[in-house]
Amino acid sequence: MASASDFKAWAQPDLVIPFRGRDFIVAPPSVDDSAKLLACAVRAEVAFGLAEGPIPDEVHAVLDTISPDEHPALGSVYNEMVAAGLSPVTIDRMAVYAIFYWARGEEYADKLATVLWTPRELPEAGEPAGPKAS
């Protein structure tokens, strides 16, 4: 059992993203980054149609504080991913996953990633997009 001063045992664990034989280890967000991540999650949920808009002005105000070279979901690991030669699409997907991992939890992030990025067969031209009738 952990002692009353064993904060390491109680701290939020890192997010470990395994990719191509390497683990990218993302530390939990700071207090400032947490607010930015929550704002990013709101914007993404509206964009993905998971939540109804509009995005509140207070959320826009937080989003406006994120500079173009800032990566609140991945932190300094973003630069490690760029240096490792990962594609922008792969890094973006990892960032979206990290946003929801920190904002809503691992299970939610896993389910959303599955819905967003699992390859699917597209219908042939002229076929209806819905389920086929038997």
Image (cartoon, helix red, strand yellow):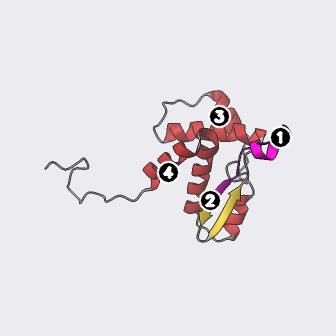
Residue 104 visible from this viewpoint: yes
Residue that badge 3 annotates: 60
Callout in the foreground (1, 4): 1
Type of the residue with mark 2:
Ile
In magenta segment, residue 40: no
Measured as percent of width and height from the top left, residue 81 is found at 67, 65
Q: Which quadrant holds residue 105? A: top right
Relative side of 98 to 52, left or right: right
Q: Residues within 10 Å of mark 1 (few under 14, many from 20)?
A: few
Relative side of 106 to 51, left or right: right
SS at mark 3 in the image? helix
Residue that badge 2 annotates: 17
The numbered dot on residue 79 is none
Type of the residue with mark 4:
Ala
Relative side of 112 to 59, left or right: left
- Number of disc labels: 4
Callout in the foreground (3, 2): 2
